[in-house]
């Protein structure tokens, strides 16, 4: 009875919660549209909130659906460029443009390029189409959550087109609710500043720069924005990505004006400068929630470790997301793991790359295990190491993980691991339910699939699964003989295996589709 009421829409709040659960599952959302009118009405906004970010859209007709809303004068201009009115749908069931919530300028521009390429008769400039799309969104009074200006690849759009779009946005400041941008182009910074300062309710901002090309002028302008009393007081969330903080002399004053700041996220920035570290340590309002450490070339490793410890001592109680890049010095990695164990109790997202000592990871997991929900580990195994000790550490890894994980990404590179180890390993995962399991190894599929089926598939321990391993193929040589070679292969491409997993309601996906990038995770969750 309850199920029938839900299907009929008698429990709208519950139904909306159910649909929201599938917000990232496009195929399921398309099925929901067909259930009934009510399900369709609450599903369509989810499908159309960010269509430009789809990796491989089946078609690009959504551009034509958006452009259907332009006025007759603009349509006449497009007609002269080979875009006739019959391209646009005569009538649509919804005002789809109203549902858009996220705009990334680079994503839009990339889709426009593909759209024009598919329609070879179109001669209209890409910048013109971009401008018309933004105009449609503004005229339909959309309420954006994120507007991300990405011109790190400035060949995608020239200064003139951006200036024209900026002027349009400045004339309509209500167009943006939250602002996030990435900027490497000094000539448009004044317009960026004007746009941001026009947002009286700005709560979230993202500074994403290329530290290798950023200038002091770039950095100075960004921190002037933070410190501006009109724009920054409402700020609750600030995300820094790829910024060189080492030459920042006075950032303390800007942050002192942020009265309602809830979290700060430092992702792959250059930060190990005693002046910068000392400034933020002295700030009570600086609540560091995410720290992703990147490699910093410096001769004084001891100073780097000392500064890192100061960071963890001050902000460890706030940290929820932690990680380090592949090229971070091993000594720094292991000291960071010790600091995590000593000072951090609330870690939810943990990304440990290029680990050669699993024992060190255990130390940190013992401390943060209860709150951990997203975990990635990249282990390099070398036959020259103590095999027995390494295997004991890998098997222990299964035992120290929490009983429920939203996301687990296990990557074992280097030499192949003996297949008998995998049976014990997957059997040891029997106490864990994992929503998304990603597995990448340097072994043959035949070495692991039987154990994954027995202990993961049949026990229904996962909801989504992606596996990348190896197969052996015969390659014909010039001499007429065959050679056995190994090739990478994904479970997603193995049709018979795919059907078997799906019979247990396990959704097999490509590795790249399930893979979570730290920056995207932080941006989405905060």
Image (cartoon, grey):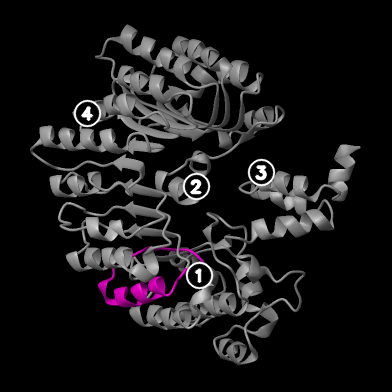
Q: Can see residue 478? A: no
State how far apart marks 4 and 1 are (Cα): 43 Å
Q: Name the residue under label 4.
A: 330
Instruction: Classify 10 Å Cα crowding around label 4: few (below 14), some (14-19), many (20 and above).
Output: some
Q: Name the residue under label 1.
A: 176
Question: Disc 4 vs disc 1: which is toward the camera?
Answer: 1
Q: At which x and y percent is residue 169?
A: 47, 78
Q: Which secondary structure, mark 4?
A: helix
Instruction: Classify 10 Å Cα crowding around label 2: few (below 14), some (14-19), many (20 and above).
Output: few
Would residue 100 be counted in the magenta stretch? no
**Which of the marked residues, 1 or 3, is nearer the chain's N terminus?**
3
**Which of the marked residues, 4 or 2, is nearer the chain's N terminus?**
4
Given residues 330 and 273, the one toward you in this image is 273
**Which of the marked residues, 4 or 1, is nearer the chain's N terminus?**
1
Q: At which x and y percent is residue 321?
A: 40, 38
**Which of the marked residues, 2 or 3, is nearer the chain's N terminus?**
3
Drawn side of residue 138 relative to residue 362, left or right: right
Q: Mark 3 points at which residue?
A: 21
Q: Which mark is residue 70?
A: none
């Amino acid at each position: 009875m309850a199920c029938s009421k839900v299907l009929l829409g008698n429990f709208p709040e519950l139904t909306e919660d159910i649909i929201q659960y599938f917000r990232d599952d496009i195929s399921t959302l398309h099925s929901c549209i067909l259930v009934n009118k009510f399900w369709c009405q609450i599903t369509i906004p989810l499908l159309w909130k960010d269509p430009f970010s789809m990796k491989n859209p089946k078609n690009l007709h959504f551009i034509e659906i958006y452009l259907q809303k332009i006025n007759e004068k603009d349509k006449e201009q497009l007609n002269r460029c080979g875009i006739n009115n019959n391209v646009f749908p005569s009538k649509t069931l919804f005002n789809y443009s109203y549902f858009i919530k996220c705009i990334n300028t680079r994503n839009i521009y990339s889709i426009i390029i593909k759209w024009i390429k598919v329609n070879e008769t179109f001669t209209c400039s890409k910048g013109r189409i971009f401008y018309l799309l933004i105009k449609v969104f503004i005229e339909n009074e959309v309420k954006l959550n994120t507007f991300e200006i990405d011109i790190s690849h400035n060949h995608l759009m020239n200064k003139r087109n951006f200036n024209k779009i900026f002027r349009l946005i400045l004339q309509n400041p209500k167009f943006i609710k939250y602002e996030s941008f990435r900027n490497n182009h000094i000539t448009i910074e004044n317009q960026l500043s004007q746009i941001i300062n026009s947002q009286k309710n700005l709560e979230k901002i993202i500074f994403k720069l290329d530290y290798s090309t950023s200038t002091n002028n770039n950095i100075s302008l960004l921190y002037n924005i933070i410190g501006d009393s009109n724009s920054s007081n409402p700020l609750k969330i600030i995300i820094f990505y790829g910024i060189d903080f080492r030459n920042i002399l006075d950032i303390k004053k800007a942050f002192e004006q942020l009265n309602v700041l809830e979290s700060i996220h430092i992702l792959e920035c250059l930060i190990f400068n005693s002046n910068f570290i000392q400034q933020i340590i002295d700030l009570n309002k600086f609540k560091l929630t995410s720290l992703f450490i990147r490699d910093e070339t410096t001769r004084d490793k001891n100073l780097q470790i000392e500064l890192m410890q100061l960071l963890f001592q001050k902000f460890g109680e706030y940290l929820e997301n932690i990680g380090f890049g592949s090229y971070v010095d091993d000594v720094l990695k292991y000291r960071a793991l010790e600091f995590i164990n000593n000072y951090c109790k609330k870690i939810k997202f943990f990304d440990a790359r290029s680990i050669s000592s699993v024992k060190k990871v255990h130390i940190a997991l013992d401390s943060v295990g209860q709150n951990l929900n997203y975990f990635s580990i990249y282990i390099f195994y070398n036959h020259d190491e103590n095999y027995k000790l390494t295997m004991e550490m890998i098997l222990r890894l299964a035992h120290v993980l929490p009983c429920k994980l939203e996301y687990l990404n296990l990557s074992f590179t280097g030499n192949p691991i003996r297949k008998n180890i995998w049976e014990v390993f997957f059997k040891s995962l029997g106490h864990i339910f994992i929503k998304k399991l990603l597995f990448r190894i340097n072994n043959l599929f035949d070495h692991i699939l039987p154990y994954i089926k027995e202990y993961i598939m049949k026990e229904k321990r996962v909801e989504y699964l992606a596996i990348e391993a190896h197969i052996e193929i015969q390659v014909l040589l010039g001499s007429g003989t065959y050679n056995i070679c190994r090739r990478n292969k994904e479970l997603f491409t193995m049709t018979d295996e795919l059907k078997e997993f799906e019979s247990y309601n396990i959704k097999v996906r490509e590795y790249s589709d399930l893979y979570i990038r730290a920056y995207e995770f932080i941006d989405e969750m905060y």
